[in-house]
Image (cartoon, rainbow, N blue to C red):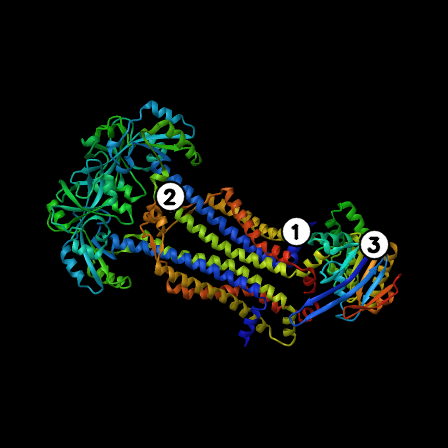
């Protein structure tokens, strides 16, 4: 009966209640859609950046991250690799040997990052084969190189031509090799497209005199949620011998970009919710003051103030829930739609995303917590505005209230 | 008299009106301050990029940006530098000889852009000389001095006065090696820039290249940002055979991010005003309901419907604009305050560095926003007034007087 | 043993200009099943006296005893519960809960007392039948006439099985016919349920029907006629 009293009181002024609930509804809708887009895009950015190159974790030699020196390369033998693969949640491991070197063809010389890869493992993680625009992908057989399209254009080199690598190898040994171009790969990011060369790990180890060595072992996980867990098992397995880097450490730009964007989004939401809170507060205040007399009567005939407070708080909660739940329910199909039909970004915005190394697309998350969190926030706001009737009723003098 | 009546009507229910005024004021204040910070951030990003490297306008040989070959130098570049210096609105001009190369130390190797400059010229165009953390900016007489970024120095494990080896291709296609002495180490907001740009004196670089005097890039600073388009047009007509580009074309992502801040602020303002619309409607609806008897009497006495409508509209606009003006004034004052003192974001320093901005932000709002905002508020108020005014117009005088 | 006993009861309001003594040294005993009207012109202190008896207002002097208990000793919460269990209220403006039906209005007071649903249902219907509104139990106050609303209010006042009913100008908003039938009803209830009624009124129709008439003037008792002393 208390519930029905609250509920009916809410509908004494239908228009007012609908307007107030609509404002909550829209706030939740805006908040959910915005958060869904932000979170979905972050998750996508992280996933695609991680998959693009670094992996979730990397095992490196101590100090390698700072110097990128071949002298800091490491040996992880097959037995160790097997052990690592046995850690639960690790889906694949990708060994690499990376170094900068000059690359020349005929009269042109450029600087490139030379990466020795296990062709199959690399493809499984980064889909390198899909980037192939000409020629063939690398095989395990010692053979040619894959060269990034932009670099190939600058060198004016084609399939079958031989590129000359010339740089510094392990422990300062001069590294030089002449290898045929097997394929040309295309990267969306100009910086990579102008400076990447891939060859088999063995070839790279031979070229740079780093026999049996790698500079990093990238690790992919089944789910980002297991990262901390795997990190712990892995670091206890490896001991203090190596450095274990997380994607957060390897891509601080991405982390900070997300943090900054997230902070801006949260500030927007806070301001929006303040405005909505005032709207609810105003409505609740009107609902309260116009019923002063009624409250006076109820207290006179013997209704305890705490019960009255309960009834009015319920009213506020109903109002907020009505808006919040309808907002959440309505936003669900919206974000679900956009989850399956992400919004591509066009125009001038695209390069900004490419600068961060991600495809310019807005993804939407359908994490149910998005909806739940917003509903909780709105409920808390409503409960905060319900302080007014509580205060009002506590102070209420029935005689005076009935006289008004 | 109508205005003063409307004004008095607003203050009949002080609490209710104050709530909506407060909501408007706080909402707009938060919005404006956040917007000003975003815009200040965008501006800072632009400024640092211009000061560090971009300058206002750059001239290249056509096609250089696609293929950064040493042989793609600007024909007759030195004459053009002289000529441009005398163009009205040009503050300073710096010619740059650019070579891609590799920087090596005993520890590691990195790809870098070698920038050959005339220090006296460059000082007027970019502020690298001001960013030295160690050493000096080509002040001494030593042989083959070089200024490198802190990040590169760390990566290569090099200190001030250490020797660094550069390898690059000469104009004739031959490979050149040069050992240079680090005389200065700079640090800008962008660690990526610091890692990949080294500065040499143009004469030294040309000598090492064994080349006649050539330049690939002419960077031009204009007297002011406002005069830039004019200078740009002049240069474009004069050097139709060259690629003349403003910083906006050179770094579209920076230009976009900066411009996006303003659109972003407008969108945010729109959302907040939309949320306020509901609160205002509710408040005015209550005001009408409360005065239904009084309005009924006025209508019975012969007040025209248009007048009644106008009266409610006027009240709504007055109510909204009061809150709006309060918000704009507090917002404007706080922005003025922070733009004077600057907002120190050094807590977020690493985050800002990623995006190449200074940690001291000077928030600002463009003047047109202060003009657009009151218009937006009046529009919001007008929309909010429709329902309450409709209600007022449709009061049946007889019923209103009898029932209430 | 008197049901209600007022001893030297006084109430002074401190208005901004000067203190107003609304009730002056009132001594009064009301016995069970009395049908008492407290009368007097506007401002004579009737409503204040009724509020003091109902514990809605605090005296500045003297005491109110209900069944020999000094209600001043009750804490705020106890006082509210005391009103709930001992006093029924009928107001001039009916003051029903607008969103509740007639039955729900009557039921609500029993809900506050923690009475079970089946009993509430039964008793609400019974009471509404007793006040002659058996047909309108599902009507909302806005669908009822003034007289009907006041009947619901009377049913509500009786629903809590109070020791007595305080009725503040119950007929002021009603026309003659309606007022008379309401008074018939209350007289009937007085008889059937042995219910004690205390009215504040200046309505001659009520005065005529009252068994005892206490006349107030300037806050003090001037006449006390018809009591069963």
Crowding at label 1, few (<14), some or many (≥20) Cα neighbours within 10 Å?
A: few
* CA distance for labels 3 and 2: 74 Å
Quadrant of the frame with the N terminus of chain B? bottom right
Residue count near mark 3 (Cα–Cα under 10 Å), binned few <14, some 14–19, many ≥20: some
Q: Nearer the viewer, residue A328 or A242?
A: A242
Relative to the observer, which residue lies in front, A149 or C7?
C7
Badge 2: residue crowd in 10 Å (few <14, some 14–19, many ≥20):
some
The subunit carrying tag 2 is: A
Q: Point out the frontmost of discs 1 and 3.
A: 1
Judging by the rendered image, the residue that carries numbered circle 3 is C129
Task: Judge by depth and name the residue closer to the eye, B228 or C7.
Answer: C7
Find residue B86 and report its horizontal and vertical position in percent: 17, 63
Find residue C157 and name its label.
none
A156 with respect to A367 (left or right): left
Query: Is C159 drawn above or below residue A208 in the view shown?
Result: below
Instruction: Please report, as a chain letter, where disc 1 is located.
Output: A
Q: Which residue is mark 2?
A: A255
Return the residue at label 1.
A306
Task: Tell me what residue is drawn at x 88 percent, y 65 percent.
Answer: C226
* Residue occupying image coordinates x 34% and y 24%: A80
Q: Residue at x 24, y 26 (%)?
A: A211
Cα–Cα span, label 1 and label 3: 32 Å
> Looking at this rendering, what residue extends furthest in the top direction?
A79
Q: Nearer the viewer, mark 2 or mark 1?
A: 1
Whether A197 is drawn above or below A142: the answer is below
Report whether mark 2 lies on the same chain as mark 1. Answer: yes
CB within 8 Å, label 2 to label 1: no
Relative depth, front residue between B336 and B355: B336
Q: Are marks 1 and 3 on the same chain?
A: no
Q: Residue C26 occupies which quadrant of the picture?
A: bottom right
Chain on which label 3 sits: C
């Amino acid at each position: 009966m208390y519930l029905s009293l609250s509920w009916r009181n809410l509908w004494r002024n239908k228009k007012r209640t609908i307007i107030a609930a609509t404002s909550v509804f829209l706030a939740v809708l805006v908040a959910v859609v915005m958060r869904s887009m932000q979170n979905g895009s972050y998750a996508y950015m992280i996933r695609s950046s991680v998959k693009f190159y670094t992996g979730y974790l990397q095992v490196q030699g101590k100090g390698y991250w700072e110097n990128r020196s071949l002298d800091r390369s490491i040996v992880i033998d097959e037995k160790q690799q097997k052990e690592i693969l046995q850690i639960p949640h690790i889906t694949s491991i990708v060994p690499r040997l990376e170094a900068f070197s000059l690359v020349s063809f005929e009269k042109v010389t450029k600087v490139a990052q030379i990466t020795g890869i296990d062709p199959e493992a690399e493809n499984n993680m980064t889909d390198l084969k899909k980037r192939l625009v000409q020629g063939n992908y690398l095989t395990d057989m010692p053979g040619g190189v894959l060269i990034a399209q932009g670099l190939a254009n600058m060198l004016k080199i084609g399939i079958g031509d031989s590129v000359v690598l010339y740089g510094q190898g392990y422990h300062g040994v001069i590294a030089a090799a002449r290898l045929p171009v097997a394929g040309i790969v295309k990267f969306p990011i100009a910086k990579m497209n102008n400076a990447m060369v891939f060859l088999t790990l063995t070839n790279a180890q031979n070229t740079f005199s780093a026999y049996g060595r790698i500079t990093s072992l990238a690790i992919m996980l089944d789910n980002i949620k297991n990262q901390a867990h795997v990190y712990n098992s892995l670091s206890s397995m490896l001991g203090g011998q190596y450095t274990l880097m997380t994607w957060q450490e390897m891509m601080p730009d991405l982390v900070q970009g997300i943090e900054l964007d997230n902070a801006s989004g949260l500030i927007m939401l806070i301001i929006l919710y303040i405005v909505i809170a005032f709207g609810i507060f105003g409505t609740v205040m009107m609902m309260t003051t116009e019923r002063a007399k009624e409250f006076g009567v109820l207290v006179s005939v013997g209704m305890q103030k705490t019960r009255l407070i309960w009834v009015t708080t319920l009213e506020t909660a109903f109002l907020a829930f009505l808006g919040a739940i309808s907002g959440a329910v309505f936003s669900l199909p919206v974000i679900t739609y956009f989850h399956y039909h992400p919004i591509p970004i066009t125009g001038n915005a695209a390069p900004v995303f490419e600068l961060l190394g991600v495809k310019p697309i807005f993804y939407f998350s359908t994490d149910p917590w998005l909806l739940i969190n917003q509903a909780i926030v709105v409920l808390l706001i409503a409960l905060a505005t319900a302080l007014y009737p509580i205060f009002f009723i506590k102070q209420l003098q029935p005689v005076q209230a009935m006289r008004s | 008299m109508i205005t003063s009546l409307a004004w008095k009507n607003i203050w009949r229910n002080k609490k209710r009106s104050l709530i909506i005024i407060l909501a408007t004021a706080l909402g707009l204040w938060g919005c404006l301050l956040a917007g000003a910070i975003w815009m200040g951030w965008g501006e800072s990003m632009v400024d640092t990029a211009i000061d560090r490297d971009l300058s206002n306008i750059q001239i290249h040989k056509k096609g250089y940006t696609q293929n950064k070959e040493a042989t793609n130098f600007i024909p007759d570049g030195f004459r053009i530098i002289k000529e441009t210096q005398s163009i009205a609105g040009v503050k300073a001009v710096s010619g740059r000889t650019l070579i891609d190369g590799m920087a090596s130390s005993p520890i590691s190797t990195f790809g870098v852009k070698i920038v050959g400059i005339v220090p006296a010229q460059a000082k007027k165009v970019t502020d690298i000389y001001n960013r030295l953390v160690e050493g000096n900016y080509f002040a001494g007489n030593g042989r083959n001095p070089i200024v490198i970024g802190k990040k590169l120095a760390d990566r290569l494990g090099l200190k001030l006065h250490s020797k660094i080896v550069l390898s690059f291709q000469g104009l004739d296609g031959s490979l050149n090696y040069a050992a240079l002495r680090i005389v200065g180490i700079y640090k800008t907001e962008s660690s990526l820039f610091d890692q990949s740009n080294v500065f040499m004196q143009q004469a030294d670089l040309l000598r090492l290249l064994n080349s006649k005097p050539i330049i690939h890039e002419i960077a031009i600073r204009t007297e002011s940002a406002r005069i830039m388009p004019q200078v740009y047009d002049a240069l474009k007509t004069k050097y139709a055979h060259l690629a003349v580009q403003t910083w906006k074309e050179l770094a579209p992502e920076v230009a976009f991010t900066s411009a996006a801040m303003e659109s972003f602020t407008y969108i945010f303002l729109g959302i907040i005003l939309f949320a306020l619309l509901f609160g205002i409607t509710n408040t005015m609806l209550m005001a009408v309901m409360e005065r239904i008897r009084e309005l009924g009497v006025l209508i019975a006495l012969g007040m025209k419907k248009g007048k009644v409508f106008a009266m409610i509209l006027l009240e709504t606009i007055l109510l909204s604009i009061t809150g709006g003006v309060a918000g704009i004034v507090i917002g404007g004052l706080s922005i003025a305050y922070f733009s004077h003192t600057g907002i120190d974001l050094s807590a977020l320093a690493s985050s800002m560095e990623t995006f190449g901005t200074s940690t001291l932000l000077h928030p600002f709002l463009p003047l047109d926003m202060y003009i657009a905002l009151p218009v937006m508020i009046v529009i919001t108020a007008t929309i909010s007034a429709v329902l309450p005014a409709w209600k007022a117009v449709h009061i049946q005088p007889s019923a209103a007087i009898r029932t209430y | 043993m008197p049901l209600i006993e007022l001893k030297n009861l006084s109430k002074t309001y401190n208005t901004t200009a000067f203190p107003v003594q609304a009730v002056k040294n009132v001594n009064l005993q009301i016995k069970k099943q009395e049908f008492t009207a407290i009368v007097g012109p506007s401002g004579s202190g009737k409503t204040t006296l009724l509020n003091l008896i109902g514990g809605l207002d605090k005296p500045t002097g003297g005491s109110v005893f209900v069944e020999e208990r000094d209600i001043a000793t009750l804490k705020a919460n106890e006082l509210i519960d005391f009103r709930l269990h001992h006093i029924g209220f009928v107001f001039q403006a009916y003051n029903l809960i607008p969103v509740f039906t007639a039955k729900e209005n009557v039921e609500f007071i029993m809900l506050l007392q923690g009475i079970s649903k089946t009993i509430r249902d039964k008793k609400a219907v019974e009471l509404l039948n007793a006040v002659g509104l058996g047909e309108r139990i599902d009507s909302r106050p806005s669908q009822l006439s003034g007289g009907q609303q006041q009947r619901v209010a009377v049913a509500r006042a009786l629903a809590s099985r109070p020791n007595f009913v305080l009725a503040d100008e119950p007929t002021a908003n009603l026309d003659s016919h309606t007022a008379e039938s309401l008074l018939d009803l209350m007289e009937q209830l007085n008889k059937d349920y042995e219910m004690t009624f205390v009215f504040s009124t200046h309505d001659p129709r009520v005065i005529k029907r009252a068994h005892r008439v206490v006349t107030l003037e300037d806050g003090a008792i001037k006449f006390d006629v018809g009591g069963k002393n």
